[in-house]
Amino acid sequence: MSEPVIEEYARSIGERIRQARKARGLSQADLAKRLGVSQPSVANWESGVHDPRRLVLAKLADSLQTPLDWLAAGDRSSVESDKHAAAAYIRRPVQHVPVISLRAAMLMAQDVTADPHPMAEDYIPVTTAIADLFAVFIDDEAVNLAFPGGTLVVIEYGGRVLPNDGDFCLASVDGVPLLRRWRADPARLQPYSTDPAYTTTLVDRSVSIIGCARVSIRIH
């Protein structure tokens, strides 16, 4: 099976299909007939709208008398590449999250419209699509299994933030800021510690949820 001469531009799968097809003197309609697909399907492959499935790629290699590994080694189309597990992460915007003190975080509990930016002592870049965030340093043995001392915890705040069972929430408990694990039915805040002496707090009127932990960062 002969291999077409790889021209400099033939880097994508679609470009390699086009190059091999022309090298065999076939039109898009001719190739489509050999494969049992429509001519627009061939046109879409060559233009990079989408890539042929692996089984079809094998049929293409056979019809074009081209090595399968040469065709498959081409760059994937932008649409197909966007399905990669990392694509969603790469698309997320980088936000500069204000780092505030726990004392400042208590102001967020008292005023749901408070803006953490004027309270910022520093900023940390975080890749996320969440808009309302601030970060606090946590040094609390009651949650040391999840957040060792000195961990920077990014909190999503706002009136619409509702904790799910198992979330870690920053709460105001009798005027004291505490990061604890939320448990439902009954609603309560649990420690997550190597020390069994820490107790669970039942959620009542003395408890106000400031926000929920979304990211934690160890600073060395």
Image (cartoon, helix red, strand yellow):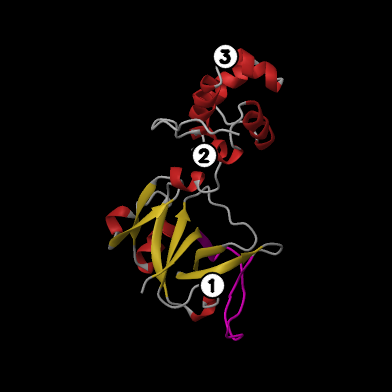
Image vertical order of residue 150 relative to residue 203, above or below:
below
Residues at marks 1 and 2 touching, judged by CB atoms closer than 8 Å: no
Q: Residue at x 62, y 32 (%)?
A: 61
Q: Position of residue 33 (x, y in %)?
A: 68, 16
Judged from the image, the secondary structure of the residue bearing numbered disc 2 is: helix
Residue on which the image places disc 1: 146
Q: Helix, strand or loop at disc 3?
A: loop
Identify which amino acid the numbered label 2 is placed on: Ser
Identity, as a three-letter code, of the amino acid under mark 3: Ser
C-alpha separation, residue under disc 3 versus residue under disc 2:
27 Å
Give the magenta part as a residue range. 188-209
Marks 1 and 2 sit apart, C-alpha to C-alpha, by: 35 Å
| Magenta segment main secondary structure | loop
Observer able to see residue 111 = no
Lower position in the chain sequence, tag 3 or tag 1: 3
Query: Which residue is rendered at x = 34% and y = 62% of the image?
Result: 99
Between 80 and 135, the residue placed more toward the observer is 80
Disc 2: which residue: 81
Q: Identify which residue, 149 or 54, lies in the foreground.
A: 54
> In front of the other: label 3 or label 2?
3
Identify the image quadrant of the N terminus: top right
